[in-house]
Image: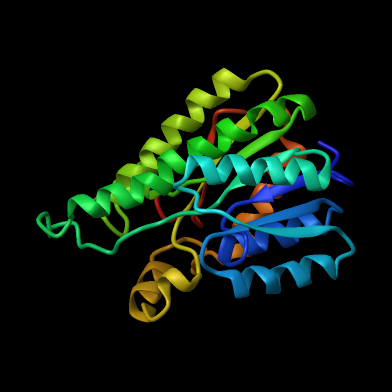
């Protein structure tokens, strides 16, 4: 896909992987719509960094767990930019609950996690589908190797990412051939989610063939690659974990 002058919406685009993805696509002269729910200050800072690359950037506050707010956001993006070519579903939610603590995995944690990581991702894809069909667009869902290994911050988080991978496959069939839908599954990434977990990070890095964990830019580069250079790939989950789980 030729990216210049086209528009990408990145959910959770103000921080971490979302921010890195927004900046990477902006370097290819894409206009960027940044979604946030709580991190307004970070989203506005990212907006300035994106604009410094010479493209248009706007921010949209929306709770990804709300179908109504997502529909309003998508309508706003199409109104403000005139088109939508790429949707990157990056917004995510977790609760840190040790897997053996079965009683600690509370009902409300399951509901909160699935509301964003599965239902919200689907809501965004559904709301954007009509416009993406018009532009032969691309959807990239940021999932996790937790959805493949069953490991991760909690059992509910791992289950949500497995479900997101399944939804990706279903949507790839439903939206083809006009729209490609893919999942990128990172391992642990150096974001604010892992702040303060230095010993855990060092242990994982030492047991990874690449001898480090990912930074957001590692994931963003793959997002760019599958959008721009993988025109015959759809429905796949691509792992970016430095070989941690080979």
Q: Nearest the camera: 193 or 93?
A: 93
Quarter-wise, where is residue 219 in the image?
Answer: bottom right
What is the x, y in percent for residue 28? 84, 53
Q: Is residue 238 visible?
A: no
Task: Say which residue appears at 68% left-offset and 71% top-offset.
Answer: 44
Task: Say which residue appears at 70% left-offset and 69% top-offset.
Answer: 46
Q: Nearest the camera: 91 or 100?
A: 91
Task: Say which residue appears at 26% left-offset and 49% top-offset.
Answer: 110
Q: Is residue 144 visible?
A: yes
In the rendered view, does 150 fall on the left or right side of 147? Answer: left
Q: Nearest the camera: 245 or 143?
A: 143
Above or below for 15 versus 221: below
Task: Say which residue appears at 64% left-offset and 68% top-offset.
Answer: 43
Q: Nearest the camera: 226 or 5?
A: 5
Count how many numbered circles sit on residues in the image.
0
What is the x, y in percent for residue 61? 59, 58
What is the x, y in percent for residue 112? 33, 52
Above or below for 207 versus 159: below
Which residue of the protein is positioned furthest toward the left in this rendering? 103
**Coloring scheme of the render?**
rainbow
């Amino acid at each position: 896909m030729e990216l210049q002058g086209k528009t990408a919406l990145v959910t959770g685009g103000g921080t971490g992987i979302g921010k890195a993805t927004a900046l990477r696509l902006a370097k290819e002269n894409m206009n960027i719509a940044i979604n946030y729910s709580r991190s307004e200050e970070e989203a506005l800072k990212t907006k300035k960094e994106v604009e410094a690359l010479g493209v248009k950037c706007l921010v949209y506050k929306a709770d990804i767990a709300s179908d109504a707010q997502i529909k309003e956001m998508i309508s706003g993006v199409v109104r403000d930019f005139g088109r939508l070519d790429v949707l990157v579903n990056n917004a995510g939610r977790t609760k840190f609950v040790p897997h053996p603590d079965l009683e600690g995995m509370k009902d409300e944690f399951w509901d909160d996690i699935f509301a964003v990581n599965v239902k919200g991702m689907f809501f965004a894809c559904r709301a954007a589908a009509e416009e993406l069909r018009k532009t032969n667009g691309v959807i990239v869902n940021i999932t996790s190797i937790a959805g493949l290994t069953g490991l991760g911050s909690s059992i509910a988080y791992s289950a949500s990412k497995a479900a997101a991978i399944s939804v990706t496959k279903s949507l790839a069939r439903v939206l083809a051939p006009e729209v490609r839908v893919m999942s990128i599954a990172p391992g642990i990434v150096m974001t604010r989610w892992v702040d303060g977990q230095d010993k855990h990070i060092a242990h994982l890095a030492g047991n990874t063939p690449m001898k480090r964990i990912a930074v957001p830019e590692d994931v963003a580069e793959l997002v760019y690659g599958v959008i721009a250079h993988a025109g015959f790939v759809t429905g796949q989950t691509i792992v970016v974990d430095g070989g941690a789980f080979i």
